[in-house]
Amino acid sequence: MTSAADERDALYGLAADKVRISADGLVYRFHIRPEARFHDGSKLDREGCAFSFNLLKEKGHPQITQQCAT
């Protein structure tokens, strides 16, 4: 998700067109856009998202690894 410079509190999905946030704000469920693709043109699916997310948590920039700590 990304924000717009002129809308401080708004977030827009890039790969997802919908998101559900749990009542406690700890769980986010994303509905992936059917047309979403990886850079190589392969379809973006939940397995690929999970792999990428876990890789970022494990080997990503310190800012990402700290924000995604579980």
Image (cartoon, rainbow, N blue to C red):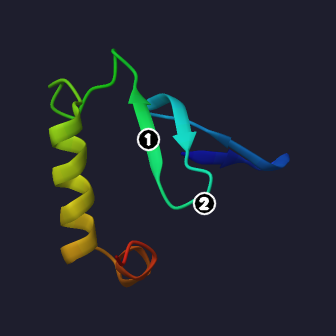
Residue beneath disc 1: 29
Q: Position of residue 19 (x, y in %)?
A: 53, 36
Q: Which numbered dot is residue 57?
A: none
Q: Position of residue 35 (x, y in %)?
A: 34, 15
Please identify the quarter of the rendering in which residue 48 is found.
top left
Q: CA separation, marks 2 and 1? A: 13 Å
Q: Position of residue 26 (x, y in %)?
A: 51, 61
Q: Quadrant of the C terminus?
A: bottom left
Please identify the quarter of the rendering in which residue 45 is found.
top left
Residue at screen point 15% across, 40% down:
47
Comes first in the chain, label 2 or label 1: 2
Crowdedness near tag 1: few (<14), some (14–19) or many (≥20) residues, C-alpha within 10 Å: few
- The tally of labels here is 2
Specify the amino acid type for callout 1: Arg
Residue beneath disc 2: 24
Residue at screen point 39% across, 72% down:
68
Q: Nearer the viewer, mark 2 or mark 1?
A: 2
